[in-house]
Amino acid sequence: MKNKLFLHIGLHRTGTTYIQKFIFPNLTNISYHPKQKTRKFIIKPLYEQENNILISDEHLSSAPLGRFLANNDREGYRSWAEHRDNVLRRLKLIYPNAHIIISIRPHYPWIRSIYNLYLQHGGVQKFENFWSEKSELFVTGSRDFMLEPIIHQIKREWSNVTILNFEELRKDPRKFIKVLAEELSVNYTLNHLIIKQSKSRLTDRNKDTSQNINRLYQKLFIPVAVREYTNKKIIFPLLQGINGRNKLNLSSHQEAITKHYYQDWRNIQNLLVSKGQ
């Protein structure tokens, strides 16, 4: 029987790091290659030389902050949706018969998590502008966060697609592994499973402080890479020590986001592997 190739392609900020560290290593009769080893497979496909292979790298579905990080070429950089389309088309050319695994989560915590990352990279936009049609980062605005078009594009390109809900992982990691293993027809153990509560890097009280610091970076023309390193290694740990480590709370926007994406989230429920379980 021909070996199977599984590609876990993100999405960004949907529990990918946890899945890569604590879920995939528990799948036993499969050769797992995390994102640090992805490059060699993109350059030269090797899945015919081994048994079943699992490759995981969220960058295979493009990065949501690409336009922001490419701030020296804003006009030349595509929107997240356009760039993602291009990345997926190239991936299809390399791996036309792969089994695609994609993880998603409800829109409000997902957008909040991306915004958290955006502040860490030195962003200054307010949250209400970050996900709106006025956003400078996403050419198509809030439509860049629509999940149904992403899922439909992937299902058009590949016949085998598994969709994981990050909220199911948070509720019960053991059940999540069991359902995933059954979906992929592989075995599993619980040897590498570590259950921990994820913690945000920003709090309500230091959100405004971080934005003001990022505005100062802009005025001083500090490169994005330097902003990210300084925030991650110095500024954010300092603010966490002063203000604690409570989750970034933008609940005043939760109702608006949930309402805006209600139909989108509802339309993909029947596609989730954990439905009805």
Image (spheres, rainbow, N blue to C red):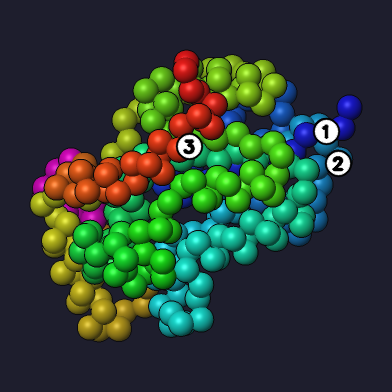
Residue 258 horizontal/vertical position (percent): 28, 43
Q: Is residue 216 left or right of residue 35?
A: left
User: Of the numbered discs in the image, which one, if any, rests on residue 36?
Assistant: none
| Secondary structure found at label 3 | loop
Q: For the residue marked with disc 3, what is the amino acid?
A: Ile
Hey, what amino acid is under mark 2?
A: Glu
Cα–Cα span, label 1 and label 3:
29 Å
User: 254 left or right of 232?
Assistant: left
Between 276 and 116, the residue placed more toward the observer is 276
Q: Residues within 10 Å of mark 3 (few under 14, many from 20)?
A: some
Are the residues tagged 1 and 2 within 8 Å (C-beta)? yes
Q: Residues within 10 Å of mark 2 (few under 14, many from 20)?
A: few
* Mark 1–mark 2 distance (CA, rounded to whole Å): 7 Å
Q: Cα distance, mark 2 to mark 3? A: 33 Å
Which residue position is annotated with label 1? 3
| Marks 2, 3: nearer the viewer | 3
- Tell me if label 1 and label 3 are in contact, CB under 8 Å: no
Residue drawn at x 81%, y 47% is 46
Q: Which residue is disc 3 drawn over?
A: 268
Give whichever of 265, 226 is nearer the camera. Answer: 265
- Residue under the point 51% across and 81% down: 76
The residue range painted magenta reads: 236-246
**Residue 163 x, y percent position in the rendering:** 55, 35
